[in-house]
Image (cartoon, grey):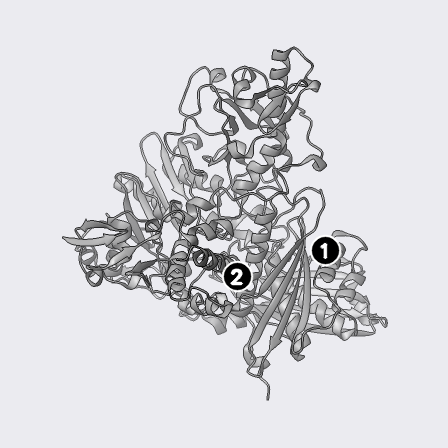
């Protein structure tokens, strides 16, 4: 039996330790906000935070995250600046890619609280949004950064 | 705001419910409040509108939620005519049903940018009829003429100022017939249409609560991954059933014609099981098919006798008489939908019914497929449309419906069929590749007197809607040319159908997305050849003050066309009319020594008739630019050994954040009937960029995706 710390709750899972985290989250724990899309860490839709760092769960094995804090989009409070900004800027279209992109944003802003547009482009250049919400993602990241700064966070 | 129906969704006993039904030649509205039906049955949502005693108003939408905004735009139209309190509005996805068929197409589907433009009259009438029923009920209670009553924010208001909420009135209103000709509002009185609203589906998407088809699950369900032939016409020769069955969680390996399904308790187990099959496939019917062979095939077809799709005047004669003629060829590749959520479908076939849960764009088609495969009548097939993670035209395809229904029959339990990303690329129904020749004649004043355009392309309609193909002409393959937004005295449009095993399908903007690139690039070539300004040259060939003329003029004004361009940059334009809308784009680019194109700014001007939901329109227009640039710079499906070589996003790059320019959107203000949005904002993007690149470099890019090597200096 494997124990994973997901969104602050210890979850027991009866699964092969060599299973990608993506499938344990989806198949075993029913956390379907973590999306399957490419399976090769190209798109960023399965991104979760592992001890605060954005990682692509399709290529992370559960055996490697046994002692780690895993955060999915459900683990962010509803009033988290990134969630608020994403609604305020009306970012999602189909919405399939957004949880992964939002979690990557959380990690990015934690290291770059006051990012320039170039820093945003560089940091978010490796995610795919097929609907083309990029202009709004940029604006939402800027807004989330401003909110965080105001909150002194 | 929940946007999905659950099994617990019943009509409230005391609600006023209005549904539509097809009458000869039109859609009629009916009061289907539960009491009138005589029994309080679980709701089969064939209704458009439910007004409950607690004042909540539910709008049932029959079109797929792909994030395009219609699940908010449709409620906005009904709320407007109803004079509802917006805060009380709810939206739910309806089961596939007769009332949700397009009054134009007579089928329920989500495509062709039709969700609102096909239903503008009907949706307004639904709201207006319900409003009139509530007003008449209140007037009767107050014993005053109905004309004395007003409505506002979910209330009927007495001349003395008192009011009754809609909820307070439904008990009596539900006994009334639906008025046939309710008066519709004058657009100058609109308070909801044309205003800013938050999209109802966004909070769930941000919180991670939206259940897409890929996420859907019901008790007893298993997951199937279906191995499909990797080469056209191939079949399996051997496979290792034992190895697949040995994977923990795999419960069945089932051949389905030329494919093999691996069914398992979990998605991951099904994927591992499928890989364990170690299938040996035959070489297929076209082992020599590859990129070069396809290119040659198209070229060869361009030389073949063509069918005339449209002719006006005498092109041959005009070309002889022209002061000068110009001829060029253009080439576009097969491209993939590459939508985020891979294809999937869940089906449960039982003795008396079949239920299907699918993020489909083709509700009627899904119902028909399941009905044919199960032998159940249509009314015993329930199709629940789930939110889709992108679609762009692909999701009307029936492959996953077929497989999930067949497997559910075999396994006697609910089965969810999912495709891996590799399956998704290999089995996509691509946007057709296309090659064309265009020859035009200019008179001595530089006016176009002849335009002859021959297209060699596969036919989407022959497979999907063969009734539309007449005399060998697929109207979609030549759309944007036969209805070119310019008036040329002599026009000849010809078509040669290219037959190849590569399957093609609907892709955003369909034929327009292909032909706008060639028409608008060549129009630019002619403008430069004539020594004219590209905007003025286009305007000179348009009907003055027509909608294409006006939208191009708006673009020129908003993008400050003709004013000095920042050092090192150049501008280009393109314009299209399609799906009853009119769009134009201005691109501002620079090109460096190494041939790298940077798009600094794109300006989009759009006339889509009345702008029902402006923020959703802006979102679509921004997205049209992103996708348009993606096809201009990157997208091309590759083939080898008789199959699809492209397998994942690493060899099918799409546009990324750093490549996205500043985007400005200008929506024309008018109160004409709504046109399409999602598709019209796409086609003129790529040609606007190519035209700007020509202006910057003198190099004409006549192929998509752009070949950077053509732009390298020295």
Q: Looking at the image, is mark 2 or mark 1 earlier in the sequence?
A: 2
Chain at numbered mark 1: B
For the residues labelled 2 and 1, say whether their Cβ atoms are less than 8 Å apart.
Answer: no
Q: Residues within 10 Å of mark 2 (few under 14, many from 20)?
A: some
Q: Secondary structure at mark 1?
A: helix
Quadrant location, the N terminus of chain B: top left
- The answer to whether any part of residue B4 appears in the image is yes
What residue is drawn where x is 39% and y is 33%? B376
Identify the image quadrant of residue B455. bottom right
The residue at the far top in this view is: B143
Q: Is residue B574 left or right of residue A68?
A: right
Q: Residues within 10 Å of mark 1 (few under 14, many from 20)?
A: many
Residue placed under numbered mark 1 in the picture = B551
Look at the picture and state if A33 lies above or below B634. Answer: above
In the picture, the disc for residue B499 is 2
Look at the picture and state if A44 lies above or below B30. Answer: below
Residue A125 placement (x, y as % from top left): 45, 67
Residue B494 placement (x, y as % from top left): 67, 61
Look at the picture and state if B17 lies above or below B77. Answer: above
Q: Distance from label 2 to label 1 (Cα)?
A: 37 Å
Residue B563 placement (x, y as % from top left): 75, 69
What residue is drawn where x is 44% and y is 45%? B203
What residue is drawn where x is 53% and y is 71%? B295
Look at the picture and state if B521 lies above or below B697. Answer: above
Chain at numbered mark 2: B
């Amino acid at each position: 039996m494997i124990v994973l710390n997901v969104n602050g709750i210890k979850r027991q899972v009866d699964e092969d330790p060599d299973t990608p985290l993506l499938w344990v989250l989806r198949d075993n724990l029913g956390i379907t906000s973590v999306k399957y899309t490419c399976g090769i860490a190209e798109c960023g839709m399965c991104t979760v935070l592992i001890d605060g760092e954005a990682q692509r769960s399709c290529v992370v094995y559960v055996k490697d995250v046994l002692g780690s804090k895993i955060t999915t989009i459900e683990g962010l409070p509803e009033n988290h600046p990134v969630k608020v900004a994403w609604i305020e800027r009306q970012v999602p279209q189909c919405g399939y890619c957004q949880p992964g992109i939002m979690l990557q944003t959380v990690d990015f802003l934690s290291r770059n609280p006051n990012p320039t547009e170039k820093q945003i482009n560089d940091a978010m250049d490796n995610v795919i949004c097929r609907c083309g919400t990029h202009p709004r993602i940029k604006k939402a990241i800027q807004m989330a950064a401003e909110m965080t700064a105001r909150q002194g966070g | 705001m929940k946007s999905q129906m659950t099994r617990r969704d019943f009509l409230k006993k005391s609600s006023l419910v209005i549904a539509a039904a097809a009458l000869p030649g039109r859609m009629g509205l009916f009061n289907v409040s539960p009491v009138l039906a005589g029994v309080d049955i679980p709701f089969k949502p064939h209704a458009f509108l439910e007004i409950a005693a607690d004042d909540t108003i539910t709008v049932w939408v029959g079109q797929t939620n792909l994030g395009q905004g219609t699940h908010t735009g449709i409620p906005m139209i009904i709320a407007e005519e109803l004079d509802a309190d917006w805060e009380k509005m709810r939206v739910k996805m309806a089961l596939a049903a007769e009332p949700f068929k397009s009054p134009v197409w007579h089928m329920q589907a989500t495509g062709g940018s039709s969700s609102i433009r096909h239903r503008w009259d009907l949706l307004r009438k639904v709201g207006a009829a319900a409003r009139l029923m509530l007003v008449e009920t209140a007037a009767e209670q107050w014993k005053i003429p109905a004309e004395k009553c007003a409505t506002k924010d979910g209330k009927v208001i007495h001349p003395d100022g008192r009011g009754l909420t809609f909820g307070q009135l439904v008990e009596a209103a539900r006994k009334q017939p639906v008025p046939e000709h309710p008066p519709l509002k004058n657009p100058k009185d609109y308070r909801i249409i044309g205003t800013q609203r938050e999209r109802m589906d966004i909070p769930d998407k941000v919180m991670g609560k939206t259940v897409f088809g890929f996420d859907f699950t019901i008790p007893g369900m298993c997951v199937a991954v279906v191995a499909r032939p990797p080469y056209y016409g191939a079949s399996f020769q051997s496979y290792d059933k034992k190895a697949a069955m040995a994977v923990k969680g795999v419960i069945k390996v089932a051949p389905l014609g030329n494919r093999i399904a691996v069914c398992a308790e979990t998605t991951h187990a099904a994927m591992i099981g499928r890989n364990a099959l170690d299938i040996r496939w035959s070489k297929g019917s076209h082992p020599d098919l590859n990129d070069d062979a396809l290119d040659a095939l198209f070229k060869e077809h361009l030389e073949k006798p063509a069918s005339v799709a449209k002719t006006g005047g005498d092109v041959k004669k005009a070309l002889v008489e022209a002061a000068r003629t110009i001829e060029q060829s253009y080439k576009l590749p097969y491209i993939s939908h590459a939508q985020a959520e891979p294809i999937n479908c869940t089906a449960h076939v039982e003795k008396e019914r079949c239920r299907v849960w699918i993020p489909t764009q083709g509700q009627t088609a899904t119902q028909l497929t399941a009905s044919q495969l199960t032998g159940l009548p249509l009314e015993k097939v329930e199709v629940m449309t789930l939110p889709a993670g992108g679609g762009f035209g692909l999701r009307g395809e029936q492959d996953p419906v077929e497989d999930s229904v067949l497997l559910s029959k075999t396994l006697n339990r609910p089965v969810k069929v999912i495709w891996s990303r590799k399956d998704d690329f290999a089995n996509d129904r691509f946007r057709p590749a296309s090659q064309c020749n265009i020859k035009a004649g200019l008179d001595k004043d530089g006016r176009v007197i002849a335009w002859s355009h021959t297209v060699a392309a596969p036919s989407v309609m022959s497979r999907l809607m063969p009734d539309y193909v007449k005399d060998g002409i697929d109207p979609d393959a030549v759309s944007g040319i036969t209805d070119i937004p310019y008036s040329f005295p002599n026009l000849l449009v010809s078509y040669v159908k290219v037959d190849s095993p590569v399957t093609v399908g609907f892709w955003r903007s369909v034929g327009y997305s292909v032909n706008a690139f060639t028409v608008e690039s060549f129009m630019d070539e002619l403008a430069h050849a004539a020594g004219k300004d590209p905007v003025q040259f286009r305007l000179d060939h348009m009907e003055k003050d027509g909608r294409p003329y006006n939208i191009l003029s708006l673009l020129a004004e908003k993008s400050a066309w003709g004013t000095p361009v920042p050092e090192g940059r150049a501008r280009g334009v393109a314009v299209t009319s399609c799906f009853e809308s009119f769009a134009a784009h201005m691109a501002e680019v620079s090109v460096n020594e190494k041939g790298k194109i940077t798009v600094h700014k794109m300006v989009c001007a759009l006339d889509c008739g009345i702008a029902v939901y402006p923020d959703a329109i802006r979102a679509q227009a921004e997205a049209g630019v992103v996708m348009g640039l993606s096809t201009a710079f990157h997208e091309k499906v590759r083939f080898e050994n008789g199959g699809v070589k492209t397998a994942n996003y690493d060899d099918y790059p799409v546009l990324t954040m750093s490549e996205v320019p500043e985007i400005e959107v200008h929506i024309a203000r008018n109160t004409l009937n709504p046109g399409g949005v999602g598709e019209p904002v796409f086609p003129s993007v790529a040609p606007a960029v190519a035209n700007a690149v020509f202006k910057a470099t003198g190099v004409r890019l006549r192929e998509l995706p752009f070949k950077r090597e053509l732009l390298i200096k020295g």
